[in-house]
Amino acid sequence: MYPERIYYEPEALSYELGEQLRQKFGTVPWIPIHSHNNIEELRGNSNREFGHMKRYLIVGIRKTHKYVENHKISDFLVPYTSSGCSAACLYCYLVCNYNKCSYLRLFVNREQMLGKLMKTAADSQRDLTFEIGSNSDLVLENTITGNLVWTIERFAKSEKGFLTFPTKFDMVDPLLNLEHGGRIIFRMSVNPEEVIRRVEFGTSPLKNRIQALNKMCSAGYRVGLLIAPVVLLDDWPKLYTELIRQLAEELSPKAKKELSIEIIFMTYSYVHRAINKEAFPNAAELYDASLMTVRGRGKYCYRNELRAQGEELLRREIAEKLGDCPILYVV
């Protein structure tokens, strides 16, 4: 990604990473702001500008460092070096938090964040797992900042703990020759190619994602697979049956032996519908009243009976084609 413009907190330039970004993107306009959380010029844009705003970068200092307990794949969700994304998946859960301002924000105080993380790991009586990619896609971010390489090299020296992050991108080559100490859990998110093409705008194709997971597994990383989110478009049984078949054929024997699987069904919202209608008027309509029910304020999820059908199909196909790969949870 080469941004059209960069909004930045002036204090961010006093950090090493801030100065590196200033030099790297010196040919684009840099616009000073008071806070990365409230850029009035962008908040006032219409929903139709959503896609265009994804071409901007926001550079600031992360001030919130509160860890959130998690009981799925990690012990804690950790605010880390970025939030938002330059891709535009139609269901993106970050839209629920940031509305149309879910553009990519980069935080330059990485030493402070990693320092707290490593101290928390060291002080614990057991190995903790930290999810560092819940607010952004760190493989994508790494192409801009190098932060994932920087993080892995340093955390590998820790005597305790694990880091994990999911991705929809295939740009993993910079990670392959790192000394990671077995302390990194790499998780690739997959969907049928038709869902990727119609719904996950700006992300890597399925075949590339599978190849990236194979590479990471071969490089000694622990690996996982997310079938996420499950999007029930027309012909969804055929699409997800084909997905599992393709995974069975293209995942390496080592990956199939070592990976674990997470399954997450799509949650949609009124906010998504409003933005997508204006920003992507010709895109797939993900809301279907006949398939969905209200969950919480302004959110939609698939009806229980339909979700149960989807889970049954996925469990059956995984058991038949991927054998003993454990399914950690289905939500």
Image (cartoon, grey):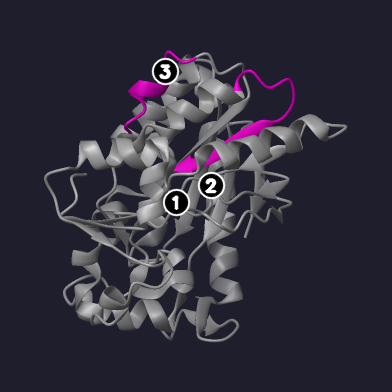
Residue at x-position 41% and y-position 66%: 35
Q: CA distance from mark 1 to mark 3?
A: 21 Å
Let me know if residue 319 appears in the view: no
Q: Residues within 10 Å of mark 3 (few under 14, many from 20)?
A: some
Identify the amino acid type marked 2: Tyr
In which quarter of the view is residue 20 placed? top left
- Residue 136: give its label: 1
Of labels 2 and 3, the one closer to you: 2
Q: Is residue 41 visible?
A: yes
Residue 164 horizontal side relative to residue 98, left or right = right
Q: Which residue is mark 3?
A: 176
Above or below 206: residue 305: below
Which image quarter holds the C terminus? bottom right
Q: Which residue is mark 2?
A: 80
Three-letter amino acid code at the position of disc 3:
Leu
User: Magenta residues, as a range?
Assistant: 156-178
- Per the image, is 322 magenta? no
Disc 2 crowd, CA 10 A, few/some/many (<14, 14-19, 20+): many
Residue 250: % across, % down: 37, 27
Secondary structure category for the residue under label 1? loop
Q: Are marks 2 and 1 in contact (CB under 8 Å)?
A: yes
The amino acid type found where label 1 is placed reads Ser
The image shows residue 213 at horizontal and vertical percentages of 43, 29
Q: Residue 252: x and y, percent? A: 44, 20
Q: Nearer the viewer, mark 2 or mark 1?
A: 2
From the image, give the main secondary structure of the stretch colored magenta: loop
